[in-house]
Image (spheres, grey):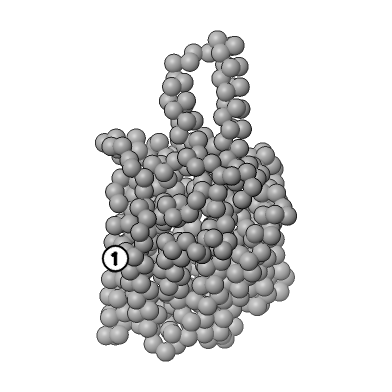
Amino acid sequence: MADLWRNRDFALLQAGQLLSSAGTQATSIAYPLLVLAVSGSPAQAGLVTFARLAPFAIFGLLAGVAVDRWSRRALMVASDAVRAAAMGALAILLASGFDAVWAILLAAFVEGTGTTVFNAALPGALRAVVPRHQLPGAVGAQEARRAVVRLGGPPVGGALFTLGRAIPFVVDAASYACSAVSLLLMRARFQEEREAAPSRLRAQIAEGFRFLWHHPFLRTTTFLYGLGNFLVPGVLLVVVVTGKSQGLTGGQIGVLISIFGAGTLAGSLLSPLSRKLFSIRTILLLELWTWLACWSFVIHPSVYVLVAAMVPFALAAPSTDSVVVGYRVAMTPDRLLGRVESVRSNIALLIAPLGPLVAGLLLEAVSARATVAIFGAFGLVLALWGTLSPAIRDAPSLDELAAGRLLARELDAEERQDREKDQRGDDGDGDEPLVRARLERLPADPAPEDD
């Protein structure tokens, strides 16, 4: 871990993202508080979170193609500029007394669009500055940084909103400017040399999808945890709305949400130990089964109980992210990384905007207790799926990931399948693209056996 932080470009990348994500977390609590103050409607409060997340589903695939075709650094800097402009414009409108809900939704949508492009390029930037065998540790450090922000961002955002509605958005605009400066100071190239891309957009997207679909572990974790993204923003909205209905101030609600951030910070610090003690399957299942704790709110519908019920998930999630994201980024060829990540995020985040939207609609139609019961039942379905999944049961070991032996194991298995096909007399005319795809999966810089 110390080697990572001596890496100048990695430290710059994380410093810029620390400031940027701090601003984002501040406005994540300010957005629903602002809409509740303007309209008093939980459904509209859910709609603004939906508007912020919807661009991931709408533009995710196009963003992946863009970051594989053009300069990732330039696109990331441009994304920061667009987001800073959107937040600055909203702050000016609020300061002038204009607080129409449509303007808030538009600003959230533009910010989300910039974030979609930025996030599509970020894995490539990370891999450009970190040796492949250090990627799980780098992802763990990245999750720790995010956890720190989740801890401090919401109470700061709630306190800033109490001081003035426009202030959190001014801070967010400044944070995006700091992120852009950190990117410009980095020395590393954010992509390898590339061949000319095929002209057809559909073919480029399909190539990324085929790579992800070909690997059962990547495919299963993409869908399983993508569906899980429905739960977190929805339950967090329940915390905000329930907290307001139980008489808490914006600052107090921010403190409660920061408890979730404290849990993710503790989980990030425990992540290296978890990777040493547990198999990947155990790490994945621990996160999935933590959603059972939400049923405690159904028994006793207090906002404090709901926040406490989310802490086990917060502790488990960073370990899951470190192994799943580290594995995926390590084994994906650089020329496909943006597209594979965009396909993954498009699938994973397609349902995420529906979480707060559904939660807001349910909170207007039924009680908070019934809303959480519906979300808890969905979490139980995901936990059962993960427990019974062969891809999770046969998950690769972390030693194989670090040493690059997993790829050899997969290639050997596929070669055996080909030999069996040859023995059955199957036609082999379509084998050349498959062989080429296999060769592209071979790691360019295999890690040493003992790091």
Please tell me which residue is depicted at 42% across the width and 61% down the height of the picture.
9
Is residue 113 visible in the rendered image? The answer is no
Which picture quadrant has residue 103? bottom left
Q: Position of residue 215 (x, y in %)?
A: 54, 37
Q: Which residue is mark 1?
A: 82
Question: Which one is in front, 441 or 158?
Answer: 441
Please, is residue 65 above or below residue 24 in the view? above
Q: Horizontally, is 32 left or right of 238 in the view?
A: left
- In which quadrant will I find the N terminus? bottom right
Q: Horizontally, is 434 left or right of 296 in the view?
A: left
Please tell me which residue is depicted at 44% across the width and 41% down the height of the picture.
333
Q: Secondary structure at mark 1?
A: helix
Question: Which one is in front, 9 or 153?
Answer: 9
Other residues around mark 1 within 10 Å, as few (<14) / some (14–19) / many (≥20): many
Is residue 144 visible in the rendered image? The answer is yes
Q: Position of residue 376 (x, y in %)?
A: 65, 60
Question: Which one is in front, 349 or 189?
Answer: 189
Please tell me which residue is depicted at 50% across the width and 39% down the height of the picture.
443
Please tell me which residue is depicted at 40% across the width and 47% down the height of the picture.
338
Q: Position of residue 304 (x, y in %)?
A: 65, 78
Query: Total number of numbered labels?
Result: 1
Q: Amino acid at mark 1?
A: Val
Q: Horizontally, is 217 left or right of 383 in the view?
A: left
